[in-house]
Image (spheres, rainbow, N blue to C red):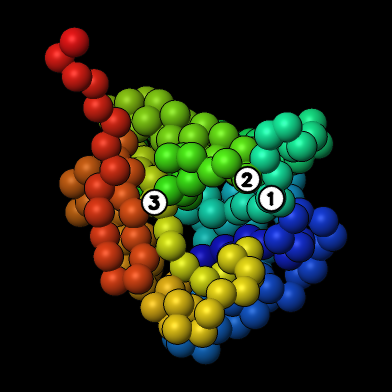
Amino acid sequence: MVVNDLGSSAAGSGADGEPAQRVAAEIVAAGGTAIADDHDVSSPSTAKAVIDTALVAYGRLDILINNAGIISWAGMPDVDDDNFARHLAVHLGGSFLVTRAAWPHLLERQYGRIVMTTSAGVFGLPTNTSYAAAKGGVIGLTRSLATAGAGHGIKVNAIAPAAMTRMAGKVPEAVAARMDPALVAPMAAYLTHEDCPVTGEIYTAGAGRFARIVLAATPG
């Protein structure tokens, strides 16, 4: 497993290799195999380097989970061009670039499992316009890739997680206790398993609850 994390602040500034190294070490300590990677997924050349790292280390690619993100709160009309562009570059651009680098290798094997990270914020965040817009774009990307991969053994789904991470900020202790990231992991495991029966779907996961989010049209 390659654990990629630029290690920036929640708002996307700076870089620090320690978060990726810490997670990789935890996986190894638990009996798994993992290496840390701190390439920036929002840049085409360094996004490709994440995939290259996996291929050099393990010789093949089976699963990709796109989970990179930033958050910098701002709503209309105060949200500026830079805020909007940075959110699109990391959430949507990062998911696109890393998947594009992985896609030829998945096609070659006629197999792959890809999980995107969206958010319930797509239902509307009045004080975080950029984040909600970027996460909405991830849904469109997920659905398009699911159709592209349908005849090639490649399944692409999205998770809208609810968990306490370093992006989440401070919340009451009682809330944090219910929002353990480990409670999201079963859904990620389900969607990346070789027997996963679905593609193009969106699921919420967190606090012990799982649910399907649907896009629907009325009869008209």
Report the residue that reaches farthest toward the left: 219
Report the residue that reaches farthest toward the bottom: 29
Residue 102 location (% of width, % of height) = 53, 41
At label 1, counting other C-alpha atoms closer than 10 Å, the crowd grade (few under 14, some 14-19, many 20 or more) is some
Residue 54 location (% of width, % of height) = 58, 56
Q: State which quadrant residue 220 falls in.
A: top left
Q: Nearer the viewer, residue 3 or 60?
A: 3
Q: Which residue is mark 3?
A: 159
At 36% across and 41% down in the image, what residue appears? 156
Above or below for 77 versus 9:
above
Q: Is residue 107 left or right of residue 212?
A: right
Report the residue that reaches farthest toward the right: 14
Determine which of the numbered discs, if any, sits on residue 127 in the image: 2
Cβ atoms under marks 2 and 1 closer than 8 Å:
yes
What residue type is disc 1 on?
Trp
Q: Is residue 195 left or right of residue 132?
A: left
At 43% across and 74% down in the image, what residue appears? 179
The nearer-to-camera label among 2 and 1 is: 2
Determine which of the numbered discs, if any, sits on residue 73 in the image: 1
At 19% across and 19% down in the image, what residue appears? 218
Q: Is residue 158 left or right of residue 21?
A: left
What residue type is disc 3 on?
Ile
What residue type is disc 2 on?
Thr
Report whether residue 106 is seen: no
Residue 129 location (% of width, % of height) = 62, 38
Cβ atoms under marks 1 and 3 closer than 8 Å:
no
Above or below for 211 versus 27:
above
Above or below for 5 versus 99:
below
Q: Secondary structure at mark 3?
A: strand
Q: Secondary structure at mark 1?
A: loop
The nearer-to-camera label among 3 and 2 is: 2
Which badge, 1 or 3, is on the more N-terminal residue? 1
